[in-house]
Amino acid sequence: MTTISTQKPPAHIYNACVKKWKVDFDKGVVFTYGETIHSKGPIPKDLMVHELVHVRQHRDYQGGPEMWWERYLQDNTFRYDQELEAYRKQYQWVKNNIKDRNQAFRYLMFYAKSLAGPMYGKVATLSKAKKEIEQ
């Protein structure tokens, strides 16, 4: 059963993410570890869809969330693939729930910029990330 926690994720995971990407839980970064989604504040519905993909990924990954995080922190291609799956589901939610096409497009571009960015290893261009999310 998925739970929401307002506490930071396990320290070794959080500290590794801070060191690698300079993220800050207190500034709204959301983490998933196993069946728990860690967020300082309310989670928008589209982001909840995204994080629930990570819950399933952790559950299905051989070795569980600890091994998932170990690989996620080290392997840019794995990290990209995991996030691509989550962004696709997130964008599907947007397309099904946000009827303003311009607003939906802004969401898509926000997701694509994130996916094409340094946190995900710059594995894809903005154009490629956008196309892959739309698939």
Image: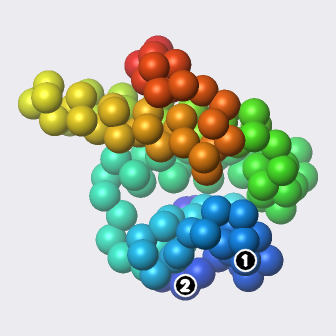
User: Is residue 5 at all visible to an observer of this figure?
Assistant: no
The answer to whether residue 105 of the structure is visible from this angle is yes
Task: Assign the N terminus to one quadrant of the image.
Answer: bottom right
| Foreground pick, 99 / 29 | 29
Q: Residue at x 42, y 75 (%)?
A: 27
The quadrant in which residue 77 appears is: top right
Quadrant of res 131: top left
The three-letter amino acid code for the residue at tag 2 is Gln
Circle 2 sits in a helix, a strand or a loop, which is it? loop
Q: Left or right: 46 with respect to 24?
A: left
Secondary-structure class at tag 1: helix
Depicted 133 relative to depicted 13: above or below: above
- Classed neighbour count for the residue bearing mark 2: other residues with Cα under 10 Å, few (<14), some (14–19), many (≥20): few
Choose mark 1 or mark 2, whichever is in front.
1
Amino acid type shown at disc 1: Asn
Side (left or right) of 34 relative to 46: right
Q: Which residue is mark 2?
A: 7
Crowding near pointer 1: few (<14 within 10 Å), some, many (20+)? some
Residue topped by disc 1: 15
Q: Which residue is pictured at 24% across the width and 35% down the height?
A: 106
What x and y, as percent, mark residue 88? 47, 30
Residue found 66% across the figure and 31% down from its top = 123
Q: Is residue 135 above or below residue 42?
A: above
Q: Is residue 49 above or below residue 14?
A: above
User: Which of 73/97 is in front?
Assistant: 73
Residue 127 vertical position relative to residue 122 in the rendered view, above or below: above
The residue lying toward the viewer, choosing from 24 and 96, is: 24
Quadrant of residue 53 in the image? top right
Q: How many marks?
A: 2
Dot 1 or dot 2: first in sequence order is 2
Whole-angstrom CA distance, mark 1 to mark 2, is 14 Å
